[in-house]
Image (cartoon, rainbow, N blue to C red):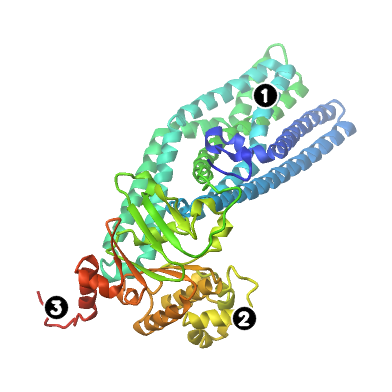
Amino acid sequence: MAHNTNPALAGIAASGLWQVTGPVRLQIAGAMTLSVLAGFSGMAALLCLALSLDGLLASPGTWPLWPLVGTIAAATCGYLLRLISFNQSHYAAFRLEKILRHALVDTLTRAALGDVQQLGSGALAKIIQDDVKSLHIFVADSTPLCARALAIPLLTLVLMLYIEWRLALSAALVLMVGTVVLMLARRNATEMHQRYNQTREQVSAAVVEFVQAMPVVRNFDSGSTSFGRYQRALLAWREVLTEWYRLAGFPARFSFAVLNALPTLMVMLGTAWFLMRGEGLDFAHLTAALLLAGGMAEAVMPMMMLSQLVNQTRMSLQRIDTVLQLPAQPVPHEGRVPADASVTFEQVCFNYGGRAEHPALRDISFTLAAGSTVALVGPSGAGKTTIARLIPRFHDVSGGRILIGGVDVREMRSETLMQQVAFVFQENFLFNDSVLENIRLGQPGADRAAVIAAAKAAQAHDFIGELPLGYDTPVGERGTSLSGGQRQRIAIARALLQARPILVLDEATAYADPETEASLIQALSVLKQGRTVIMVVHRLSLARDADQILVFEQGRLVESGQHAELLARTGCYARLWQEYKQTQAWPFTADEAQP
């Protein structure tokens, strides 16, 4: 079941664009009403102007005071009403933008982390920023224009029919012809717009790939492969544009030429000339009709142009709804608290994305004693990282259960579970803040001494002391001013400062040099007292001193024991250890490099 901060946003893609304005609908309705009133005021100004001209012709030496005052007052009122209307629609759009972003973030925080990661950080950033901004533009600009474009032509036509029905019919005929031709020009607009957006996104992706892969490009293909993909994407985009222009070329240009004031006025003047030759035509009526007709023609075109914005916004709405429909991870109302830091897997099965035919884990059962150090080893794809990520409930198991201190992790509240497990990823995120603040993330009340102690335990204190401002040195965006190994040690210090009873290290030494790796092993041997340490390792030197080693292969637990015991069995672990020793001792010389 999807969870949103605002129930009105549930299923917004299926409901439609106008339904998404539910939380701010009254404000939008007010803005649309003001826009219509602004249009009416503009029409009143035109009618007063016609009366002013008629008065000047009737009495050339006398200024028609009240019609002129009415013209100025109506024009001023229309200007103010239109300004207030757009202010209101923009305020409503900002409110909706805030509501949508809160709903998106709330949904992401309540969904399983694995589901969130499958969407990808780039796609989520685009949805939360660009797609929500697209809805802002739709609400802020389209709603007043749409109200005006619907109401003004109808009222104008009614007034013109009242003033001079024959001139009204001639103007309506011109607009009808232009509208029909424009509809023919846009008969394939939805499909072509989708193709246009797809090819444009392919061009953008190719550009990003080319720029991000520049070091690889310069070293290997000199741009021929990656730039070739960009060229093909650009050609596909141009072909779509050419086809769209060919299909809509003449009808679109013809309708744009017709749906403006000049053709309408020309036809009306011809009709007026014909009428004047016959029974005559009142000048005031002619002037009022001509002024109103120009406004009617100009009001129709925005309505036609809104469809393109609507198509763009509808696609953004679908992507937003994809996030809002993420199921919330079930959380118990009254969570239980674990008795200790032991970890137990009971016949755990798991598959990603419901792919039961390719399970990531199959019938996994083991128990980790509280305070022990456990190493998870095995070939790539064996399920080690999946095991580690199931413990803090990044995913929910497909079968079986996981216990911490005798309590199923699904029976704990989220905050209780997070108080039990600290996690260090292979790729860790550092915020654009100081080293000090990055270490005490999650423990904002920790004093400087505690931060330094955690950094020392993570073998990070020495290099931090060499930074320009020590612990107050900014690390840059995503920690770019530090090396990979330095970022990793800061992340370990952050986890150690939290002092949680279970510490999960997912390839935590991936960026460590041999000297740092040895230091980390020594630090972990001290830190394991009273804490359960679970290490996902590829460097088997880290597994050697673990209290227990769990060996996985193809999603199954195939061996368990200590280093010497597993070597004596000459099984999977012994084979992995032998391969590891060979890679460590591999002398890459010119002679051995020959085939």
The local crowd at label 2, few if under 14, some if 14 to 19, many if 20 or more residues have their Cα within 10 Å, is few
From the viewer's side, name the closer residue of 527 and 245.
527
Query: Residue 448: which disc?
Result: 2
Residue tagged by mark 1? Answer: 154
Marks 1 and 2: which is nearer the front?
Answer: 2
**Residue type (three-letter) at the residue carrying disc 2:** Arg
Task: Point out residue 227 in the picture as x, y percentages from the top left corner.
Answer: 31, 60
Res. 61 in view: no
Query: Residue 593: which disc?
Result: 3
Marks 1 and 3: which is nearer the front?
Answer: 3
Seen from this angle, which residue lies furthest left? 595
- Residue 326 versus residue 257 in the image, above or below: below
The local crowd at label 3, few if under 14, some if 14 to 19, many if 20 or more residues have their Cα within 10 Å, is few
Q: Quadrant of residue 250?
A: top left
- Residue 568 versus residue 163 in the image, above or below: below
Drawn side of residue 468 relative to residue 291, left or right: left
* Between discs 1 and 3, the one toward the N terminus: 1
From the viewer's side, name the closer residue of 135 and 547.
547
The local crowd at label 1, few if under 14, some if 14 to 19, many if 20 or more residues have their Cα within 10 Å, is few
* Between discs 1 and 2, the one toward the N terminus: 1
